[in-house]
Image (cartoon, grey):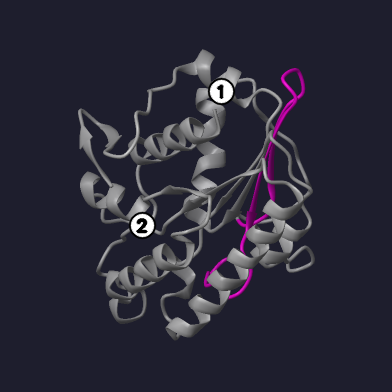
Amino acid sequence: IGYTLQGRWITTFCNQIQLDTNKINGCLKGKLIYLLGDSTLRQWIHYLPRVAKTLKFFDLHGTGPFKKYLLLDAERHTQIQWKKHSYPFITSHLYSVRDEGYIPREIDRLSGDKNTAIVITFGQHFRPFPIDVFIRRAIGVRKAIEQLFLRSPDTKVIIKTENIREMHVETEWFGDFHGYIQYLTLNDIFKDLNVGVIDAWDMTIAYGTNTVHPPDVVIGSQINMFLNYIC
C-alpha cells in the first residue's frame, strides 16, 4: 500500500530510502539474485545495467526475447538472472523449451543463503484460464518457498504482484477483472509467509500506467523497493 509523490513510490508501511548508483552497487555486492516470472520482471534485468553500469550481460546462447538472461559483475561478485515461468505462457514469439522449468522446481534447485534473493511474479499469462490453475500454481510456489526456508532461512524472497494493463487487448481474456481476482488470491495465499511483497497492482494504479509493461519510472520504483528489502 502506498502512493506516488513527484514520480516516486512511497509505501505507507515502512521507511524506504531512494538509492543512488553508489548505494545500489554496494547493495548488490556479493549478491545472487534470481528473477523468476514473466516479461514484467524481465524489464528489471534490462533496467538494472542502466543504473549499475558495471553489470554486463553474459551470453547464454539463447534465442528470442524469452531466453534466459544473465547479468554479471565479476569485480563485485554479483549475479542476476532472469528466467521465464513455465506454462501457461501465452506469446506470439518462438521460445526454446529445452530449459523449461516451473517456478517451484527452480526454487528447489537453489541452495540459498543470506546473500541470495529470489523475486517471483506470475499472473498475466494465467488470466484466460480457470482460477484453480492459478491457485494450484501459487500453492506450489508457497510450498517450495517453505522448503527453501527450512534449508536456508536467511534467503530473501520477494513476491511481485501482477500489474494492471491496457483494456483494449482481448479484454474478456486478459482484463483486469481476472487479474484482480488473482491479485487477491495471491495476497491470501502468501499473507502469513515471511516474504517481501512489491505491490505492483497498487503501484501501477497510482501511476495510472494502464499498460502490461509499465514505463521506466515504475520499474525504477519497483527495483528501489526490492533493494530496500534486501539491503
Residue span colored magenta: 66-93
Q: Residue visible at 75% across and 17% down?
A: 75
Q: Residue visible at 66% across and 22% down?
A: 29
Q: In which quarter of the view is residue 11 placed?
A: top left
199 or 126: nearer the viewer: 199
Mark number, residue 52? 1
Secondary structure at badge 1 equals: loop
Q: Position of residue 194 (x, y in %)?
A: 53, 50
The reply to whether callout 1 and callout 2 are in contact (CB within 8 Å) is no
Q: Position of residue 220 (x, y in %)?
A: 41, 34
Residue type highlighted by circle 1: Ala
In three-dimensional space, the C-alpha distance between marks 1 and 2, rounded to whole angstroms, equals 25 Å
Q: Residues within 10 Å of mark 1 (few under 14, many from 20)?
A: some
Residue tagged 2: 163
**Residue 74 visible somewhere in the drawing:** yes
Secondary structure at badge 2 equals: loop
Q: Is residue 97 above or below residue 81?
A: below
Q: Position of residue 146 (x, y in %)?
A: 65, 60
Q: Is residue 29 above or below residue 95?
A: above
